[in-house]
Amino acid sequence: MLNFLDSPNFVSLAALEVGQHFYWHIGSLKVHGQVFLATWFVMAVLIIVSLLATRNIQRIPTGMQNLMEYALDFVRELTRNQIGEKEYRPWVPFIGTLFLFIFVCNWSGALIPWKLIHLPEGELAAPTNDINTTVALSLLVSIAYFYAGFKKKGLGYFAKYVQPTPVLLPIAVLEDFTKPLSLSFRLFGNILADELVVGVLVLLVPLFVPLPVMLLGLFTSAIQALVFATLAGAYIHEALEGHGDEHDEEHA
Amino acid sequence: MFDFDATLPLMAVQFILLVVILNAIFFKPLTAVIEDRANLIRSSQTGAKEGLEQINAITQQYEKELAESRRQYQSVIAKAQADAQKLASDQVAAAQAEAVAQREQATQELSAQKVSAMAELEKQVDGLSQEILNKLLVGV
């Protein structure tokens, strides 16, 4: 009686594909088309919602403006908590976009039935379950905090590498590599693992049983977006302050 | 799973583009609105606080004035009552004195009239007795 796994229905409902991509060739370069399609969708959602929210700005917000003001308040608070009252303002767009983009990406992977759109190869999913996306974002965070440090202190920024004691210089240098590495792999691993777990469960027990795991996936996705944005803020704050102390990196 | 290719830089460029676009259409306008609103709320709050302080000051002054005028009118009432009391007792005393004096005068006049009437009567008694005597003697 266990042969239901073989029935074509279920296989097409829940097949796992990892490491297969829908390649586009641009000149001699290869890119992952499915990531770009999903990313464009996410960006379009963010832009359309922003346009709706700011189309008719009222002093007393209603509807979409209310929602987006809530989102803006949230990312402003997040940025202010991390970077501090004095310097947080210019960083709100960057960290806010990080949060909103990752959040919408993750939730689009969990909520939108991408499966219904068939690609010749690979499948549509959250853009954040592709390592290229997460590495791109975390490298941007690295660039951002180097930029913040150099802009604030010029070449004096390098002083923080030998600040408490020159003995820790290797570790301080190593940190600049571990930061983007941990940022990108945390996000990538969490989202990919979440989608795989849901996929495997759907493959095994197609109905209702995977729902709690899917809810957990929604929760994880939101938390990962928050963690990424928070850590980006913390790194920028660290570069601005330069006292070189450790923020806890060991989230989820 | 770990195949890096041109997706990475293109995603970075796309993301920067998204930051720029969202900054223009989302962060800037809504931040302006939120801060405007915060300023409005703060200013109207300080305005209301100032108004409240003014009202409190006015109320205190009013209460002070009220207490002052209450004291004043009470003292005025007390003075007026004392005055009226004094006036009344004065008048009563004067009227009593006058009454006593009038009664005394009346008594004196009365006794004087009595005396004069008695004297006149005595005078008349002499005349009448002479007349009676004459009539009697003529008749005899």
Image (tube, rainbow, N blue to C red):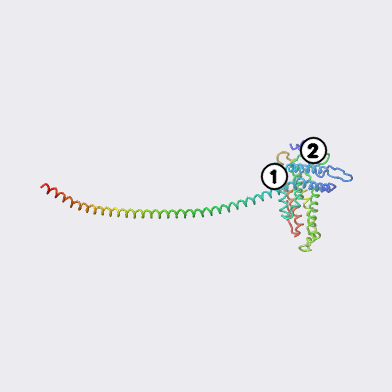
Res A192 visible: no
Tell me the amino acid under the disc marked 2: Ile
Which quadrant would residue A157 be assigned to in this image? bottom right
**Pointer 1 chain:** A
The residues bearing labels 1 and 2 have C-alpha atoms spaced at a distance of: 41 Å
Q: Is residue A114 left or right of residue A61?
A: right
Helix, strand or loop for disc 2: loop
Res B76 visible: yes
Residue identified by numbered label 1: A59
Query: Which percent across, then down, holds residue A55?
Result: 74, 42
Q: Is residue B47 left or right of residue A102?
A: left
Tell me the amino acid under the disc marked 1: Arg
Give me the residue at 28% from left, 53% from top: B109
Query: Which percent across, then down, holds residue A248?
Result: 73, 55
Residue identified by numbered label 2: A117
Helix, strand or loop for disc 1: loop
Which quadrant would residue A45 be assigned to in this image? top right
User: CB atoms at circles 1 and 2 under 8 Å apart?
Assistant: no
Q: Earlier in the sequence, mark 1 or mark 2?
A: 1
Mark 1 or 2: in front is 1
Query: Which percent across, then down, holds residue B105?
Result: 30, 54
Query: Which percent across, then down, holds residue A129?
Result: 78, 46
Mark 1 crowdedness (10 Å alpha carbons): few <14, some 14-19, many ≥20: few
Tags 1 and 2 on a common chain: yes
Closer to us: B23 or A224: B23
Point out which mark residue A250 bears. Answer: none
Q: Is residue B1 left or right of residue A58?
A: right
**Pointer 2 chain:** A
